Image: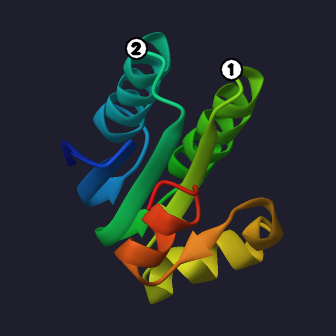
């Protein structure tokens, strides 16, 4: 998996590409979220548009990231959840847990940053 970090206003967007699975993928995401929270970045969007597969470790890391963000008073939202990832989150009954957006601008505005 590959991860790129960019910022729009006061919202940090993590663009994930590839498979979010046990091993490198989940560790990259965990490290990125931990680093952002350490820098007091409170508005995080995870862009999943180019994530082709999500296993249980990837699902676990999304949930752990959300919990950690909330513990630090931050918000974490999902963007562009593809059909396969959506289906995985649906089967795990986690869709209501996350705020999910189809439009990046809308996700950014949802933080009140616009």
Q: Judge whether 112 appears above or below 27 on screen.
A: below
- Numbered tag placed on residue 72 in the rendering: 1
Image quarter hosting the C terminus: bottom left
Provide residue 31's location: percent of width, then percent of height.
38, 22
Q: Gap in Å between the C-alphas at discs 1 and 2?
A: 11 Å
Q: Residue furthest front?
A: 114
Seen at 45% across and 27% down, the residue is 41
Q: Judge whether 88 appears above or below 58 on screen.
A: below
Q: Could you tell me if the residues under marks 1 and 2 are in contact, i.e. CB atoms within 8 Å?
A: no
State left or right for residue 74 relative to residue 40: right
Count of numbered circles on the image:
2
Label 2: how many Cα within 10 Å (few below 14, some 14–19, many 20+): few
Q: Judge whether 40 appears above or below 13 on screen.
A: above
Seen at 35% across and 28% down, the residue is 32
Circle 2 SS class? loop
Q: Residue 91 lies in what quarter of the image? A: bottom right
Seen at 73% across and 32% down, the residue is 70
Q: Which residue is mark 2?
A: 39
Provide residue 67's location: percent of width, then percent of height.
73, 34
Instruction: Give the camera-side residue of 103 and 87.
Output: 103
Label 1: how many Cα within 10 Å (few below 14, some 14–19, many 20+): few
Circle 1 SS class? loop
Seen at 74% across and 72% down, the residue is 95
**Mark 1 or 2, nearer chain start:** 2
Q: Residue furthest bottom?
A: 83
Instruction: Give the camera-side residue of 61 and 109.
Output: 109
Provide residue 88's location: percent of width, then percent of height.
61, 73
Q: Residue 48 lies in what quarter of the image? A: bottom left
């Amino acid at each position: 998996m590959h991860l790129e970090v960019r910022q729009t206003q006061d919202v940090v967007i993590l663009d994930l590409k590839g498979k979010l699975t046990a091993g490198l993928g989940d560790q990259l995401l965990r490290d990125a979220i931990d680093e952002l929270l350490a820098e007091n970045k409170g508005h995080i969007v995870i862009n999943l548009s180019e994530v082709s597969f999500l296993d249980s470790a990837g699902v676990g890391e999304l949930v752990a990231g959300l919990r950690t963000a909330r513990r630090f008073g931050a918000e974490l939202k999902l963007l562009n959840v593809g059909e396969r990832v959506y289906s995985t989150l649906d089967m795990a009954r986690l869709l209501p847990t996350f705020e999910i957006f189809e439009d990046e601008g809308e996700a950014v505005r949802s933080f009140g940053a616009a």
